Each structure stands twice: as C-alpha cells, then as structure tokens.
Image (cartoon, helix red, strand yellow):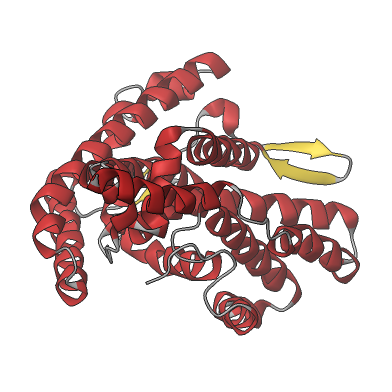
C-alpha cells in the first residue's frame, strides 16, 4: 500500500522531467557570439582560425567538466580533487604512448590512431577504477559534509600529484602529437590545425553520447531524476547509491579522457596540470548551472571562444575574460544557464 502511494506521488515528478519546456535562449549564445565577433576581427580567415581553435579548446574543457557537473548535481559532492583524474589519465596514457613511440611517429593514420586509441582506453579504464575506489574510500564517509569534502578531496589531489612525481618523476614529460595529426589544413586562406579538428569531433561525440544516455535511456532518466530529487528516486525503489558510484566512475573516466586530450594539446605533461585547469572547469560548471550537461557544454564553448577572441582583439582583457563572462551570465541568470539542482 505504501509503495503504491509513493509511486502515485512520485511518478508525476518523473513525467515532468520528460515534458519540461525547452529554454532555447542559451542555445543561441554561441552562434550569436561568433557572428558578432566576425566584423570586429575583420578578416574572415582569421575569424575561422580563432573560432575553430576556441571550439576545440571548449570541447576539451567540456569533456573534463561534464563528469564533475553530474557529480555535483547527483551526489551533492564538492570534489575539488577532480583535477587529479585529469593528471592521472594523461600520465597513464604515456604507459602506452611512450612504448609505442614508433607507431606515433609512423606516417600512417591507422597506426597513429591505434596507439592513441589504446592510450585513451587505458587512461579511461584506470581513472574510472580510481574514481570508483576514491568514492568508496574517500567520499562515502563524508557525504553531506561539504567542508570535509573540500578538505579531503583537495588533500586527495595533493597526494595524487605527489604520487605522480614519485612514479613518473618531477620533470615535465614531452608528449608530441602523432605524425598524422600534426600541421594544419588550409581552408581557403584559413589555417586550421588538424588536432583541433579531432578535438572538436571527440567533444561532439562525447556530448552526443551523454545526451542520448541522459535523454533516451532509463538510466539517464534515473540520473536526471536523481539530480532533480534523489529522495523521490529512492522512494520509487531504485538504489541511488549505485547511481552515485556509476556517475562518479564515469565522471572520473571522462576526466581521464580530457587529460589525454589536454596533454596532447599542450604537447607536455606535468603533475600539476589537473590542478591548473580546475579553475576553468569550475567556472564552466558555474556558468552552465550545477548538474546540467547541456549548460556545461554551452558554458565551455562560450568561455573558450571569449578567451580566444579577447586574446586577439584586446590581449590584456584575455586574462580576466573568463571572470567577466561568468559575472555577465550570473547577472542574467544567477543560477547558471540551465540549473537542474534545487538545493
């Protein structure tokens, strides 16, 4: 009888997630920004180069931030150690990329992509397992205690950085791009780096995969419902804790993928690379709205494009462009572009 009552009260809330009205205004921000900058940049080839570079950077930041925004939204966990998974993923990839140096240097796209694919798979597997262990050992005892979460996850990131220094050494490790992904493609007078095109494609694939899982599957419905109202999902008889572990491991694996992509983008690795990029990741999550993958996607693209355009038009403004963008978005929408968490 109790179950029936709970079902009857909770199911309309689940159905409301499926019928929620679409807010299209944030969707026009990225194309509007790009078109607005065209006359200011003045040169169409330069505008294409800047735009593609911004999109590529935004996609890599989105990959790293998307898992963290779900962790924030579903688990209410302030994971300041997320950057550790970025660094670990990048360094684990070297276990494949350095021994397969010959494959990376070969003038064969197939051999290059095979070595890169194996490195990414190993990095995602390692960071996914590390994320699972991190959630079980570090996070689980401090659920609902935000101050302890901040302290313990920051401590975890420091420990991870030191472990990387112990295993791989404190020196910067060069990570050159595969031969086939070096150089640029000429599109008219515009030069577009090959790797940035790859980054755009990978970022789009990750976004589409997450969109389909979250919006076209029962698992995604449970995750979205859990972000919206975790107690309601538990009342329906689903074990929200298992979703917690799954989301944490998946978010950690995405951070590992982002770490590999970012390391190849910079063509070098340091143990602190994950911590260095966390400021941008948090800004993207704040702009997009806690728990929103779509908001995270738009926020990452906006931030990267603004930084690129500002760096070209007003170089001194580029240093604070991220902060100014965040202030502008929060003045318009104080809870971010698409907020789905109501706590």
Instruction: Tell me: 143 left or right of 272.
Output: left
In the current view of this chain or complex, which residue is farthest to the front? Answer: 1
Above or below, 72 relative to 101? below
Visible residue check, residue 289: yes
Q: Which is more toward the observer, 290 or 7?
A: 7
Above or below, 318 relative to 25? below
Q: Residue at position x 60%, y 66% from top?
A: 303
Instruction: Tell me: 242 left or right of 200.
Output: left
Indicate the quadrant where residue 77 lies. bottom left
Q: Residue at position x 45%, y 65% from top?
A: 290
Numbered circles on residues, count: 0
Q: Position of residue 29 (x, y in %)?
A: 73, 64
Q: Position of residue 157 (x, y in %)?
A: 20, 60
Q: Which is more toward the observer, 306 or 13?
A: 13
Q: Which is more toward the observer, 256 or 67?
A: 67
Q: Position of residue 123 (x, y in %)?
A: 31, 35
Q: Residue at position x 75%, y 51% from top?
A: 49
Visible residue check, residue 68: no
Q: Quadrant of the N terminus?
A: top left
Above or below, 240 relative to 125? below
Q: Quadrant of the C terminus?
A: bottom left
Q: Position of residue 153 (x, y in %)?
A: 19, 64
């Amino acid at each position: 009888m109790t179950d029936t009552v709970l079902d009857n009260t909770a199911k309309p809330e689940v159905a409301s997630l499926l019928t929620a009205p679409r807010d299209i205004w944030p969707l026009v921000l990225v194309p509007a920004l790009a078109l607005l900058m065209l006359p200011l940049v003045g040169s169409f080839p330069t505008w294409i180069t800047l735009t593609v570079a911004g999109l590529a950077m935004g996609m890599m930041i989105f990959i790293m931030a998307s898992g963290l925004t779900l962790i924030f939204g579903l688990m209410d966990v302030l994971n300041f150690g997320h950057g550790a998974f970025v660094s670990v993923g990048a360094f684990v990839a070297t276990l494949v990329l350095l021994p397969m140096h010959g494959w990376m240097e070969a003038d064969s796209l197939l051999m290059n992509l095979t070595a890169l694919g194996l490195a990414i798979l190993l990095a995602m597997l390692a960071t996914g397992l590390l994320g699972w262990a991190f959630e079980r050992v570090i996070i689980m005892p401090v659920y609902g205690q935000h101050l302890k979460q901040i302290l313990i996850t920051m401590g975890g990131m420091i420990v991870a950085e030191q472990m990387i220094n112990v295993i791989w050494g404190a020196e910067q490790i060069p990570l050159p791009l595969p031969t086939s992904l070096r150089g640029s493609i000429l599109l008219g007078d515009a030069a577009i780096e090959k790797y940035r095109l790859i980054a755009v494609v990978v970022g789009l694939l990750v976004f589409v995969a997450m969109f389909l899982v979250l919006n076209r599957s029962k698992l995604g419905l449970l995750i979205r419902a859990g972000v919206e109202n975790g107690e309601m999902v538990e009342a329906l008889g689903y074990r929200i804790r298992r979703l917690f572990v799954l989301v944490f491991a998946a978010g950690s694996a995405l951070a590992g993928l982002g770490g590999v992509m970012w390391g190849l983008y910079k063509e070098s690795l340091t143990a602190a690379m994950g911590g260095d990029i966390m400021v941008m990741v948090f800004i993207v999550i704040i702009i997009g709205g806690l728990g929103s993958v779509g908001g995270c996607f738009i926020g990452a693209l906006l931030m990267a494009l603004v930084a690129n355009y500002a760096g070209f038009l007003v170089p001194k403004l580029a240093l604070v462009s991220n902060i100014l963008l965040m202030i502008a978005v929060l003045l318009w929408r104080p809870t971010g572009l698409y907020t789905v968490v109501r706590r």
